[in-house]
Image (cartoon, rainbow, N blue to C red):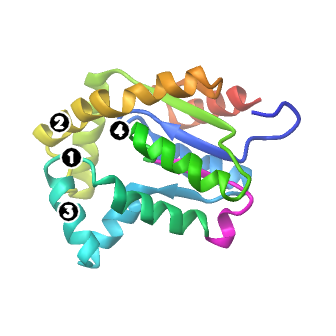
Amino acid sequence: MTESATPSRIILIGPPGAGKGTQAARLAERLGVPAISTGDIFRANVAQRTELGQQAQRYMDAGEYVPDEVTNAMVADRLAAEDASGGFLLDGYPRTEAQVAELDRMLESSGASIDVVLELTADTDELVTRLLGRAAEQNRSDDTEPVIRRRLEVYSEQTAPLVTLYDERGLLVRVDGLGTVDEVTQRILDALG
């Protein structure tokens, strides 16, 4: 993260239900960059019943991640869009070390790099409660309790190691994701300073 400029290429990382999507939308508006959510991309494809959407649905319904090659291709296309040329907030990507390496390659090809990785932290029981509430409100088939618990396990197994990787690179900033939306947004803005 450069000291003289506001970060414009940001990754939001954290377990399912930590508030990444909500905060990405708020920060994107403040910073004037697009919020790019792989979850939204997957759900749009599922709703449109595309071939990709049908493949993604099988993984999502089981609480598993969509394979890297499919996800990487979608993200590369999205980052190549004109509105992302000045920066972006990534929500839900990367989730594996292989995706980190692919994202590095994508950005290096245009002379760019990630400025900061914001980790939203939250208690597991609170996350389950949040996700069950969201499932009831939005009738989301990918948010049943067994699937939620599996998603949290998969996060711990596959994504949590990214926190260590980005911390070693000096890019990680941890922010408490519990509290009101406004409180969490303010914590993030303070952390970006």
> Helix, strand, or loop for circle 3?
helix
Residue with the mark numbered 4: 17
78 is higher (above) or lower (below) than 92: below
Residue 127: image x %, image y %?
30, 31
Q: Is residue 177 visible?
A: no
- Residue at the extreme right: 4
Q: How far apart are marks 4 and 3 (CA)?
A: 19 Å
Tell me the crowding category of disc 2: few under 14, some 14 to 19, or many 20 or more residues within 10 angstroms, Cα based: some
Residue with the mark numbered 3: 57
Residue with the mark numbered 1: 64
Q: Nearer the viewer, mark 4 or mark 2?
A: 2
The amino acid on which the numbered mark 3 sits, given as a three-letter code, is Gln
Q: Distance between the residues labelled 4 and 2?
A: 13 Å
120 is higher (above) or lower (below) than 73: above
For the residue pair 190 and 171, the one nearer the viewer reads as 171
Write the residue at 40% across / 64% down. Answer: 41
